Image (cartoon, helix red, strand yellow):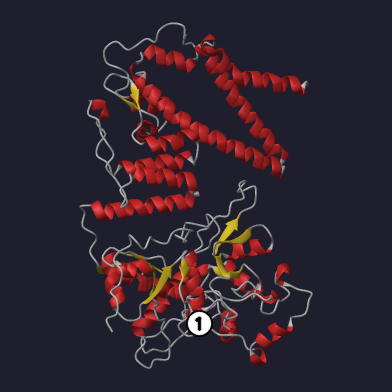
Amino acid sequence: MNTPALISALHTLCRAPLQLGAHLTGAMLVRLGILCLALFTAIGQLVHQTRDPRLVLAHADLVEKFSQQVHLAQLTTALDAEASGAHALSLETYDGLRDGTCSFEAQPELAAGRTCYQSTGDLLAAWLGLNYFEAQRRIDDAHLLIGRRTPQGTICEPRFAQLAEVYAKGGADRRSIAATARRLEKLEATDTTFDGVPTELKARGTDGRFLEEHAAESLRSLGPDEARKDISSRISLYKQLKGDKLPPKLGLFIGPVVQGVHEFTLRTLATQAQLIRSIAVQASAPRTKAGQAARTPVQPDGSTEAADQPATEPTAARAAESAESIDRSGTAEEPTAGAPTWLRTENPMPDWARAAEEPSGAKPELPADDAEATPGKSIPANAEVASDREEVSVALRRLNALMAILATPAGGKAKAVIPRFIVYMWLSDLQNLDRAYGTTSNGVRLPPGELRRALAKANVIPVVLGGNSQPLDMGRSRRYHEGYVRAGVLARDRGCIVPGCTTAPDHVEIDHYKLPWAEGGTTSVKSGAAVCPDGHHSRHLGQLKIVDVNGLPHVILPPHLDPEQKPRRNTYWDALQLGDAPDPDVAGPEPPENDE
């Protein structure tokens, strides 16, 4: 086989439709399309036979590009079918197209009298073997992102011009762009362009910009999960401010009993939700005091008794617990045989580190109410209990913790989980509480009214932010990122800072990213970065880098994921970015001076 000649012929084939243009007949175009499909199918079969992982990945990238182009072609052809009146063709024309005997030389033959199909959606559903709603959805999506018909039969710009630009350039997943356009359309009035009445977009954010503009910007600059969350948050806020529907009724609703299991529905406000989320987070951590206690249900008399319900849910976390005793700070306390190689050192421990160790080999233990602060910190006193007892599911531990609060009387033996209420807010927010929003450590967003009420109560800890997104006065440094030091890091990073990571804040570890503790590094808010366990290991293995940019830790992903090698911070958990601090000149009035 003359391979160079074959490749040259294929290049010519690819250029032929654009170069020859009108010289190609309709039959030729159909034939070229069939040949392209056959070639693509054959290539996929050959790749499958090789089982070469490199070739598989290269082909997977090609398949995804085909998929994105196919999505664009589906909407474009749906609009073309509508604009050309394809549903009005004669029955003989449809039959000829299906059996390949239709001639494209003559003008299309239209049906005389009643058409075979009432609409383009009916035609596409029958012709392509689709559900009607899927066929009509393609037409509707085309109106949002490709173009719309006018009363004169021409095509005008789509309803969402900025999203259409991102869609045409392939700046993001085209399926996600179409889904976003459908969500935004629900916030707008009915489109009457085809009736000759122009319609304009109405949905705007709190800053006065169109929600479409925000969505297009998010899809262009953020990862898929980050963009989806950002767009969802803006749409949800818009509905809250503009919606006419009343919110669901608050309360505890008793549901049915299914095979002896009672079901309840609980609806709360944001401040109440934070208390419940705090209990759930503390009880979910299997290696904390709260998590250990929640493994055993509490009886009505306050005593504890081993659960008689066998747990049959094996988890990877249990295997990880027995294989690793890694501290959240990024160093190993005593590497075991199962410890990763990057945790082991051939050099003896320096003198200053020996002096900093706890006496008698004791390890620092979390405060009783600090279970949420370091969820992965092992508790030596309870380690044997954890290993001997069957793993209890996360949902059951949460239930046990809640029942302990409800059932334990004063002086009871079981210790109930104490909810924690930490609110992140800017220094300028304290000067402008009438419209300030707050965010709790568990990601619950507090509207202004609830924020003011929460700050007026006791047991609410405000973490005030100022300057370049840095927490203010979070306490003294120590060896482990615990307590308020960890809270300070999470106030800044909110969750894992690796772009696109969705690991919840309560599952992240704090890494000494500037200088490891074993090499003389210090433990403070500035020295720590919140990363998930996988990201933590990846940094130590050199698969990604964490660098300091003006006091904020940023991640540099591998070149194959980020060719620009640009320092980035995850936005999924609303991590603070450079320049996020509000302008004090416009944030609100200055606090009154002390008259004393």
Along the horizontal axis of the image, is 512 left or right of 273?
Answer: right
Q: Looking at the image, is 401 positioned above or below residue 42?
A: below
At 34% from the left and 89% from the top, the residue drawn is 409
Say which of 271 and 202 sits in front: 202
Query: Which residue is the site of mark 1?
Result: 289
**Where's residue 283, x and y in %?**
46, 76
The amino acid sitting under disc 1 is Lys
Left or right: 52 in relation to 425: right
Residue 168 against residue 101 in the figure, above or below: below
Quarter of image, res 86? top left
Q: Where is residue 544 in the image (x, y as percent from the top left)?
A: 64, 57
Label 1: how many Cα within 10 Å (few below 14, some 14–19, many 20+): many
In the picture, measured across the screen, residue 425 lies left or right of residue 39, that is: left
Residue drawn 25% across and 69% down? 251
| Count of number-bearing discs | 1
Nearer-the-camera pick, 437 or 130: 437
| Residue 378 x %, y % | 58, 79
**Nearest to the observer: residue 293 or residue 549:** 549
- Whether 330 is drawn above or below 579: the answer is below
Whether residue 258 is visible, yes or no, is no
Give the image quarter of residue 137. top left
Question: What residue lies at 60% left-to-right and 69% top-to-bottom?
Answer: 511
Horizontal side of residue 546 vs 569, given as left or right: right
Residue placed at 42% from the left, 78% from the top? Answer: 400
Residue 482: x, y in percent? Answer: 53, 78
